[in-house]
Image (spheres, rainbow, N blue to C red):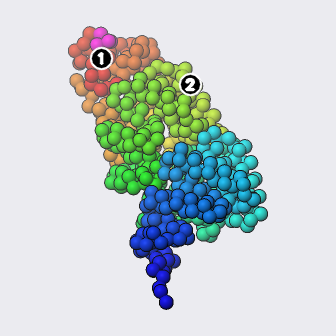
């Protein structure tokens, strides 16, 4: 009796020895049956070799179609569509989705029709954000789940319902559906490729909503699901990138810097969107640490993967003295973004608009951010809206109202363990307290901000705050405050109102400033202050 030369390959596959299985199947490439090719494609996928897996899967699809096994061919086309979309090539993914749809149109109803309905429902939601489309798809998917007893489709239906509920502003209800949707995944009833996509969908939604607590919970769950499946499993790297995103908020920037570039590079050919998000996150850490060139490089890599790299790349332009270009970049990005995508950029746009003297535009953006935050009701979005409104109030000289909003935002960021945001709010609080004449509270808030910035290694922030400490030419702290107000174009009366002192005291401080600095006019004093980076 002649032994089967492929028996060792099939045995290795059954033992989940993916490398041995792949090598054995590849060694007998010409004699593989369609079933053997399916095993080879799956072994390559588990090893993280998505391009090879997809190439073999395309051959499987052609064989199945040629042999009249159209239902199985549709399944393979759907899998290929998801892999191409995940990889980041939307055109090829759409083509494979169209193939699956065309094959299924001629076939009786089956669970594959449910996978197609789920795929199309989530794709429509990503592009247009229309919850009605997702709800209609959920009804169809759930009906097919009951008809064919497919637990994966039950999870897909709940996922569609959950995302639709969140888009309608029923966030708690939506996440209750999403939590339930993961039960078939945890029970091992959903293919790992589709399971990983479910996890990524929900974690990305948490990130967009600024809900770090939920993002941590879902990332921890994904880690428990993915880690036992081995280091070559694509979603192990996906999980780690999500963990590193959370470490940015928690302040472990050294770990992020050491890992995130390599992790992102590993996913370029397999999970293009998340690789782009990883590079963008790396750019953010570098920008905050003062590595402008490194940040620019990371943002460029993100853009190469169709990530807009906003608002970070715009904030980098502003830090380099190009605020008009920065605001223009954000205007363009806002025009192309979804509602939640806009929410990610709005706070930065508000601050830049105020800096450019576009108070009316800033007020419009603040109103939009507040509306979005109230609609979704998540802590991160609400804190972002409070910060934007506070910035507008401060620009209008209404410091007291700004203080209350900033203290509320600070409480949210402390609870979320978002350290840089906490420091930024305390820095804004220092300005608000000082404008309200509460100098002791201003000094305390500034000290808190400086301590956090220093611990994080946020060099530009530390430099900005400590530059004010130098007080060149023997200027007092109060003289520096007067000089900053004057440099912004305020009259003696306006300076007096802002600092809660008399106009006579302002005049006395100005005379002292002119003498110490060696100038004879307000204009010259303002120019000197800018040269000294005091304003």
| Mark 1 Cα shell of 10 Å, populated few (<14), some (14-19), many (≥20) | some
Q: Secondary structure at mark 1?
A: helix
**Prevailing SS of the magenta stretch:** helix
| Mark 2 Cα shell of 10 Å, populated few (<14), some (14-19), many (≥20) | some
Looking at the rendered image, the disc whose residue lies closer to the viewer, 1 or 2, is 2
Observer-nearest of 203 and 190: 190
In this view, 207 is above or below 386: below
> Which picture quadrant has residue 179?
bottom right
Residue at x 39% of width, y 40% of height: 299
Q: Secondary structure at mark 2?
A: helix
In this view, 233 is above or below 462: below
Residue 527: assigned label = 1
Residue at x 65% of width, y 64% of height: 69
Residue 12: assigned label = none
Residue stretch in magenta: 521-525
Q: Which residue is mark 2?
A: 363
Observer-nearest of 203 and 100: 100
Instruction: Please state the horizontal and vertical placement of residue 257, each as a whole percent of the image.
Output: 34, 51
Query: Decide: marks 1, 2 in contact (CB < 8 A)?
Result: no
Locate residue 282 relative to residue 142 in the image: left or right: left
Distance from Cα at disc 1 to Cα at disc 2: 29 Å
Observer-nearest of 449 and 5: 5
Residue 128 visible in image: yes
Instruction: Please state the horizontal and vertical placement of residue 229, each as a whole percent of the image.
Output: 48, 69
Instruction: Please state the horizontal and vertical placement of residue 384, each as a whole percent of the image.
Output: 53, 38
In this view, 405 is above or below 28: above
């Amino acid at each position: 009796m002649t032994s089967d030369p492929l028996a060792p390959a099939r045995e290795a596959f059954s033992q989940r020895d993916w490398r041995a299985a792949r090598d054995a199947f590849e060694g007998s490439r010409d004699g593989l049956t369609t079933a053997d090719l399916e095993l080879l494609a799956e072994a390559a996928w588990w090893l993280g070799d998505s391009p090879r897996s997809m190439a073999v899967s395309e051959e499987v699809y052609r064989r199945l179609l040629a042999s009249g096994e159209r239902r199985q061919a549709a399944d393979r086309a759907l899998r290929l569509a998801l892999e191409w979309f995940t990889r980041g090539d939307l055109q090829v993914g759409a083509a494979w989705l169209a193939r699956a749809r065309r094959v299924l149109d001629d076939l009786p109803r089956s669970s594959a029709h449910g996978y197609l309905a789920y795929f199309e429902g989530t794709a429509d939601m990503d592009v247009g954000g229309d919850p009605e489309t997702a709800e209609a798809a959920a009804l169809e998917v759930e009906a097919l789940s009951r008809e064919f007893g497919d637990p994966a489709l039950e999870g897909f239906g709940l996922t569609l319902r959950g995302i639709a509920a969140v888009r309608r502003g029923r966030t708690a209800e939506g996440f209750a559906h999403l939590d339930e949707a993961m039960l078939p995944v945890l029970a091992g009833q959903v293919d790992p490729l589709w399971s990983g996509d479910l996890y990524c969908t929900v974690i990305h939604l948490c990130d967009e909503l600024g809900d770090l607590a939920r993002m941590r919970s879902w990332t921890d769950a994904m880690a428990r699901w993915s880690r036992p499946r081995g280091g070559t499993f694509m979603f192990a790297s996906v999980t780690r990138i999500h963990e590193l995103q959370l470490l940015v908020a928690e302040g472990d920037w050294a770990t992020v810097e050491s890992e995130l570039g390599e992790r992102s590079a590993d996913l370029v050919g397999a999970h293009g969107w998340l690789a782009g998000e990883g590079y963008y996150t790396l750019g953010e850490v570098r920008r905050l640490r003062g590595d402008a060139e490194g940040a620019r490089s990371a943002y460029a890599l993100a853009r190469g993967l169709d990530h807009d790299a906003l608002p970070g790349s715009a904030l980098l332009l502003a830090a380099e003295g190009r605020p008009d270009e920065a605001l223009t970049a954000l205007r363009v990005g806002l025009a192309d973004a979804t509602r939640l995508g806009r929410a990610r950029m709005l706070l930065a746009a508000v601050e830049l608009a105020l800096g450019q003297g576009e108070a009316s535009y800033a007020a419009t953006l603040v109103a939009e951010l507040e509306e979005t935050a109230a609609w979704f009701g998540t802590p991160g979005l609400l804190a972002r809206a409070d910060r934007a409104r506070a910035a507008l109030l401060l620009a209008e000289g209404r410091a007291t109202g700004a203080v209350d909003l900033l203290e509320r935002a600070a409480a949210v960021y402390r609870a979320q363990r978002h350290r840089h945001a906490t420091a930024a709010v305390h820095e804004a609080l220092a300005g608000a307290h000082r404008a309200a004449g509460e100098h002791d509270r201003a000094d305390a808030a500034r000290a808190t901000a400086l301590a956090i910035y220093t611990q994080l290694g946020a060099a530009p922030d530390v430099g900005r705050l400590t530059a004010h400490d130098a007080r060149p030419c023997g200027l007092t702290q109060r003289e520096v405050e007067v000089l900053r107000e004057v440099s912004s174009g305020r009259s003696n009366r306006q300076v007096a109102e802002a600092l809660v002192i008399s106009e006579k005291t302002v005049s006395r401080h100005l005379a002292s400033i002119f003498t110490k600095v060696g100038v004879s006019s307000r204009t010259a004093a303002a120019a000197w202050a800018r040269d000294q980076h005091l304003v």
